Image: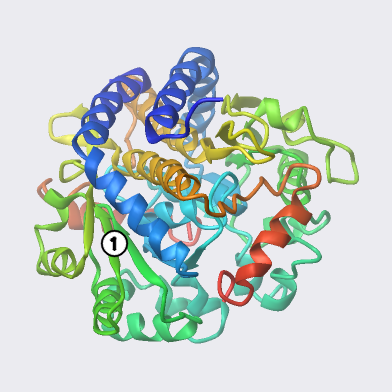
């Protein structure tokens, strides 16, 4: 076992990022093609992850340089929209993200149109809510992009009554290349430390944005990007763009 | 312009930031370890996309236990603020919100505060720093110094902080050029999340070196993890999840 230092983490994490680029670039481009096609057809990309996977949606949305037709779905919407209580949502003896048969209700909360695409993120790919939403979206005819750790998901049993894992529902599956349990560094004890899926998630999120923009530009389509304050007329441009997708992205 | 360029350009930024902030990373990791040794929690705060750093340290697989995430959304979930008000783009600029959020949680005297703001310190966030400072707490700040220094709130934040970690990113932090002056793909949170994990490694090293407990969480999605995680989180019951 190595001595645990930040240098050990940095070296191992960068090796993993190199692997992600080498192994998954083709899948990231395929996923971007699905998203670009939806955007060309006035569609929206719905992004759903629970737990720390919420960070993926957050990374894609709401800043200068972000694409506007991205909609973040969060499990807390169940509470905010009155579908359950906060006490039930936080019940430590019945983890919300593990439950099945609730995502139908989540899907129905939003303005989802036939041309829309779904990105569902779960490092383990075994929990009820994410699998449920993917099943629902697939049954409604949407294209599904899955981001998961294949090493993790193949090592653990599904918690969904169907026995399915999330990756089985994807039109495109992006393996985040992370280890089982997410943590990277051996400590010599039961626990490993320093997780990587949020870091690989940011790389995947930013790669999708880059490739979607590239495809739209090459096809001479409008690119619905939030502009920064350095660009003349940015306020009106951004306001008009947000208005175009009003009710579909928040 | 393509995704491969994002990988190569972000690596250069990461290599620079991690080398440049080497001493600051170790200093902050050890100071956080000292808070933990005193049975303190690190209160983690970031708003909007800046929540990334708090999520990377708080109740995270492979992470240390003594953290609590402060989350503006709790104000909505606990019925203190209407959802419509929360969705107002200027919500985070309300000073009163900072105080309400601070008072929402159980924050013990030995707890410290860590604020992450990649490029802009919002008024509600600064208000929380001000309260923590007035209470004599240790304050850690992580952000792009060049970016946050553009505004008065950013300068005040840096002045409040006992220790600062600089992401070393530009303003804005978009690194690929689509055409003309249109830039896309942000990099600050890549640096932020890598820094968060490096802090975890160095705090772990520091505590182990002193022969102290290092309560590390397992992924909740590994068989048997619930028992382990419950055991180490119960030590901080009603604090980590307040």
- In front of the other: B224 or A80: B224
Percent across and percent down for residue B202 are 40, 43
- Front residue of B135/A203: it is B135
Image quadrant in which the N terminus of chain B is located: top left
From the viewer's perspective, is A245 left or right of A119? left
User: Residue A169: which quarter of the image?
Assistant: top right
Residue A124 x, y percent position in the rendering: 69, 38
Front-most of A191 and A218?
Answer: A191
Count residues near mark 1 (Cα–Cα under 10 Å), then give few for <14, some for 14-19, many for 20+.
many
Q: Position of residue B143 (x, y in %)?
A: 24, 52
Report the residue at 75% width, 43% height from top. Answer: A131
Residue A92 or residue B51, whichever sits in front: A92
Q: Is residue B131 above or below residue B211?
A: below
Q: Give the residue displayed 9% in from the left and 68% down from the top.
A: B152
Q: Horizontal placement of B13 versus A173: left or right?
A: left
Q: Which residue is mark 1?
A: B140
Residue A79 occupies quadrant: bottom right
Q: Secondary structure at mark 1?
A: strand
Asked if residue B73 shows in the view, the reply is yes
Residue B141 shown left or right of residue B55 in the figure: left
Q: Quadrant of the C terminus of chain B?
A: bottom right
Q: Is residue A35 above or below residue B3?
A: below
């Amino acid at each position: 076992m190595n001595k645990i230092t930040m240098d050990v983490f940095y070296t191992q994490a960068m090796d993993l990022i190199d692997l992600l680029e080498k192994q998954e670039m083709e899948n990231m481009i395929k996923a971007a093609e699905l998203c670009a096609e939806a955007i060309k057809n006035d569609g929206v990309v719905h992004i759903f992850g629970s737990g720390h996977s919420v960070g993926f949606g957050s990374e894609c949305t709401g800043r200068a340089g972000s694409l506007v037709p991205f909609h973040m779905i969060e499990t807390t919407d169940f509470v905010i929209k009155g579908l359950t209580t906060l006490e039930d949502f936080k019940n430590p003896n019945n983890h919300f993200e593990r439950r099945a048969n609730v995502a139908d209700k989540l899907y129905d909360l939003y303005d989802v149109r036939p041309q829309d695409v779904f990105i569902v993120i779960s490092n383990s790919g075994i929990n009820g809510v994410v699998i449920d939403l993917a099943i629902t979206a697939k049954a409604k005819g949407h294209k599904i992009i899955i981001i998961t750790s294949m090493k993790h998901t193949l090592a653990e049993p599904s918690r969904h009554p169907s026995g399915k894992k999330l990756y089985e529902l994807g039109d495109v599956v992006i393996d985040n290349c992370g280890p089982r349990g997410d943590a990277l560094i051996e400590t010599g004890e039961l626990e490993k430390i320093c997780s990587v899926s949020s870091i690989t998630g940011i790389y995947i999120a930013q790669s999708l944005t880059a490739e979607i923009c590239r495809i739209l530009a090459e096809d001479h389509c409008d690119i619905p990007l939030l502009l920064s304050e350095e660009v003349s007329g940015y306020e009106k441009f951004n306001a008009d763009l947000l208005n175009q997708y009003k009710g579909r992205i928040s | 312009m393509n995704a491969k360029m994002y990988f190569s350009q972000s690596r250069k930024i990461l290599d620079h930031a991690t080398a440049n902030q080497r001493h600051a990373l170790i200093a902050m990791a050890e100071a956080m370890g000292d808070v933990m040794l005193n049975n303190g929690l690190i209160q983690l705060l970031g708003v909007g996309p800046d929540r990334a750093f708090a999520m990377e340290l708080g109740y995270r697989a492979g992470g240390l236990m003594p953290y609590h995430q402060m989350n503006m959304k709790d104000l909505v979930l606990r019925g203190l603020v209407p959802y419509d008000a929360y969705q107002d783009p200027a919500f985070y600029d309300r000073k009163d919100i900072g105080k309400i959020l601070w008072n929402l949680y159980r924050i013990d005297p030995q707890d410290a505060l860590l604020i992450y703001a990649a490029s802009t310190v919002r008024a509600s966030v600064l208000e929380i720093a001000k309260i923590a400072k007035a209470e004599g707490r240790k304050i850690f700040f992580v952000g792009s110094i060049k970016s946050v220094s553009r505004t008065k709130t950013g300068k005040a934040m840096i002045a409040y902080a006992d220790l600062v970690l600089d992401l070393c990113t530009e303003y804005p932090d978009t690194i690929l050029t689509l055409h003309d002056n249109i830039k896309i793909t942000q990099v600050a949170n890549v640096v932020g999340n890598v820094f968060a994990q490096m802090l975890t490694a160095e705090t772990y090293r520091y505590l182990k070196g002193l022969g102290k407990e290092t309560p590390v969480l397992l992924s909740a999605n590994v068989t048997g993890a619930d028992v382990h995680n419950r055991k180490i989180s119960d030590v901080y019951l009603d604090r980590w999840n307040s």
